[in-house]
Image (cartoon, helix red, strand yellow):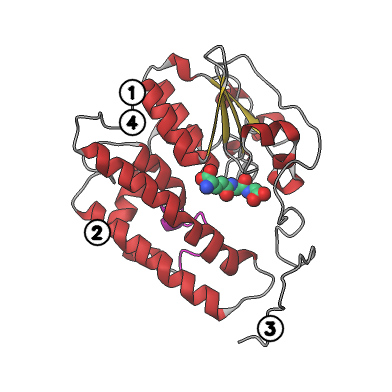
């Protein structure tokens, strides 16, 4: 336990020792002028290959694989550890200064979309794919699980992941609290997947695409080095689903886009053409890589 007593008025301690202390601020808005680059495709994505970023690139790759050529996109890298989310151009696409952010330039007036869940729904509706139709009973189920993910993952990332992996000291109280919640969430998913092939039922939808990078990544040992700590092997139905979704070629491509960690062959820093997956991953660009 700590002997910390909150002061009457909170003030900002710029160097609190946490891993992201150098970029986090209690104020919104841009810190510097910086235009965003624009490529040749209708969709311009400004992102990073974190779980939130991967959701969008996985859906875009799924749409292209399903023949929706209007989903061609340029994916530009936003390095959040360098504060690029606070550039004026980025803030004009996402006033919340977080990746992913999308600009749809297919119409005369470009449309901005931010929040990964909103981007998934916007794209799925635009192309009429990966979301059940308004007549289908699975639509409500799909939207429920999509919003479940958006509400739940901050406990996994901002709560458990932060205190287990990033905080300057290991503190039992927050780690216990968020480990319990994350295990409860895994159990919720495990029970849902016991009787359903996919999260929202029989169809693979944006609910799977939203949930897989977070909870699929967690049970496959890709997040926070926490697989053993959380006994992820116990969630058998989540494991089965995570393996199946992870084996999809579009998912394998999507998770490489804008990624700046892991094996060099898994990192495609920017995506401007389908051929980039063959020719521009970091192992191909780095000498002797
Ligand atoms: N609810 C948002 C969360 C986005 C988010 O947290 N993005 C993180 C990276 S995964 C980010 O850009 N962080 C930069 C910052 O906090 O300054 C979404 O789903 O789009």
Residue 210 placement (x, y as % from top left) = 42, 43
Among the 4 quarters of the image, the one containing residue 143: top left
Q: Quadrant of residue 164?
A: bottom right
Return the residue at label 1.
Answer: 128
What is the quadrant of the C terminus in the image?
top right
Residue 213, visible in the rendered structure = yes
Q: Is residue 268 above or below residue 11?
A: above
Circle nearer the N terminus (2, 3): 3
**Going 67% across and 75% down the picture, which residue do you hit?**
169
Q: Secondary structure at mark 4?
A: loop
- For label 4, the residue is 130
- Residues in magenta, as a range: 215-228
Q: Which residue is mark 2?
A: 191
Magenta region, main secondary structure: loop
- Of badges 4 and 1, the one in the foreground is 1
Of pointers 4 and 2, the one earlier in the residue sequence: 4
Locate residue 85 relative to residue 196 in the image: left or right: right
Alpha carbon distance from label 4 to label 1: 7 Å
Of callouts 1 and 2, which one flags the residue occurring earlier in the amino acid sequence? 1
- Residue 72 placement (x, y as % from top left): 51, 19
Q: Nearer the viewer, residue 96 or 261?
A: 96
Discs 4, 1 touching: Cβ within 8 Å: no
Residue 270 to residue 83: above or below: above
Q: Secondary structure at mark 3?
A: loop
Indicate the quadrant where residue 97 lies: top right
Q: Give the residue number, with chain letter if any, for mark 3.
A: 4
């Amino acid at each position: 336990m700590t002997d910390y007593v909150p002061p009457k008025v909170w003030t900002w301690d710029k160097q609190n020792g946490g891993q992201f202390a150098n970029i986090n601020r209690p104020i919104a808005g841009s810190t510097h002028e910086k235009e965003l680059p624009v490529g040749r495709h209708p969709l311009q994505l400004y992102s990073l290959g974190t779980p939130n970023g991967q959701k969008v690139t996985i859906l875009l790759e799924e749409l292209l694989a399903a023949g929706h050529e209007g989903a061609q996109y340029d994916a530009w890298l936003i390095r959040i550890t360098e504060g690029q989310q606070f550039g004026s151009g980025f803030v004009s696409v996402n006033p919340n200064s977080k990746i992913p952010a999308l600009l749809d330039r297919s119409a005369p007036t470009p449309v901005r979309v931010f929040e990964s869940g909103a981007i998934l729904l916007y794209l799925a509706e635009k192309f009429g794919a990966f979301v059940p139709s308004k007549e289908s009973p699975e639509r409500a189920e799909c939207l429920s699980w999509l919003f479940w993910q958006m509400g739940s993952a901050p406990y996994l990332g901002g709560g458990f992941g932060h205190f287990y992996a990033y905080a300057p000291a290991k503190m039992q109280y927050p780690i216990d609290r968020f480990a319990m919640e994350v295990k409860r969430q895994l159990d919720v998913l495990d029970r849902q997947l016991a009787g359903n092939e996919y999260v929202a039922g029989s169809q693979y939808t944006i609910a799977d695409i939203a949930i897989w990078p977070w909870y699929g990544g967690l049970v496959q040992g890709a997040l926070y080095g926490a697989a053993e700590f959380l006994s992820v092997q116990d969630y058998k139905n989540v494991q089965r689903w995570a393996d199946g979704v992870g084996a999809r070629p579009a998912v394998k491509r999507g998770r490489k886009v804008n990624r700046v960690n892991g094996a060099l062959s898994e990192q495609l820093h920017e995506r401007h053409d389908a051929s980039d997956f063959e020719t521009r991953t970091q192992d191909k660009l780095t000498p002797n890589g």
